[in-house]
Amino acid sequence: MSEQHDQHHAREPEVEPDHVDARMIAAVGGGTVVAIAISAVAAWLLAGGRAHGGGTAEPQRQPPPEVQAIDLQPFARTLEAERFRAAEAQKLERWTWSDRARGRVRAPLDLAIDRYLAAHAPSLARGGSR
C-alpha cells in the first residue's frame, strides 16, 4: 500500500498550454471598447444629450453667478492683516505716546535696544542681568 501511495503522490501535474487563444484576447478587448462606448453614450444622455464645456460659440466675459457669489472674506482678512502688521511695524520704528498723562513714550526699537545696552553694558559684561 505504501508503494501505491508513493506512486499516487509522485505523479507530475498536468502542463497547461503555453499559448493563449488570440480570438479570446480580441473578444475581451472588443467587449471592453463596446462597454466604454455604451458608458459614454449613457453619460451623454444623462447630461441631457448635449456637450458641456469645451468649445462654446461665444466666450463668456463674466464669470457665472455662482462664481461671483463666492465669499471674498478670506481675501479681505488677508489685506486687513497686512495693514495691521504694517501699522504695528511703524510703531516699532517711530516715537509714539504710550501714556501721555504719565509722560511715557515708546521709542523706536533700534534706539531702545542701543540705549538699554549702553546703560547696562557694564553689568552685562560681568554676567549680571541688570
Image (cartoon, rainbow, N blue to C red):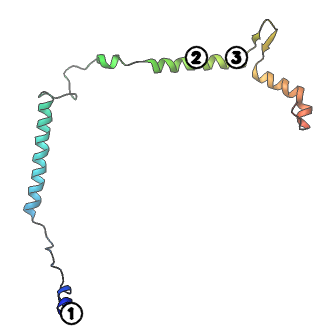
Name the mark on residue 83: 2
Is residue 61 rendered to the left or right of residue 16? right
Q: Report the residue at 17% width, 86% height from top.
A: 8
In the rendered image, which quarter contains the C terminus? top right
Q: CA distance from mark 2 to mark 1?
A: 95 Å
Q: Report the residue at 17% width, 80% height from top.
A: 13
Report the residue marked by disc 3: 91
List x then y, in percent, for residue 25.
12, 60
Contact between labelled residues 2 and 3, with CB atoms less than 8 Å apart: no
**Circle 3: residue type:** Lys
Report the residue marked by disc 1: 2
Q: Nearer the viewer, residue 62 or 68?
A: 68
**With respect to residue 1, does 47 lie above or below?**
above
For marks 3 and 2, the one nearer the N-term is 2
What residue occupies the far top of the structure in this picture?
101
Q: Quadrant of residue 92?
A: top right
List x then y, in percent, for residue 15.
16, 77
Is residue 115 rendered to the left or right of residue 3? right
Contact between labelled residues 1 and 2, with CB atoms less than 8 Å apart: no
Element at badge 1? Answer: helix
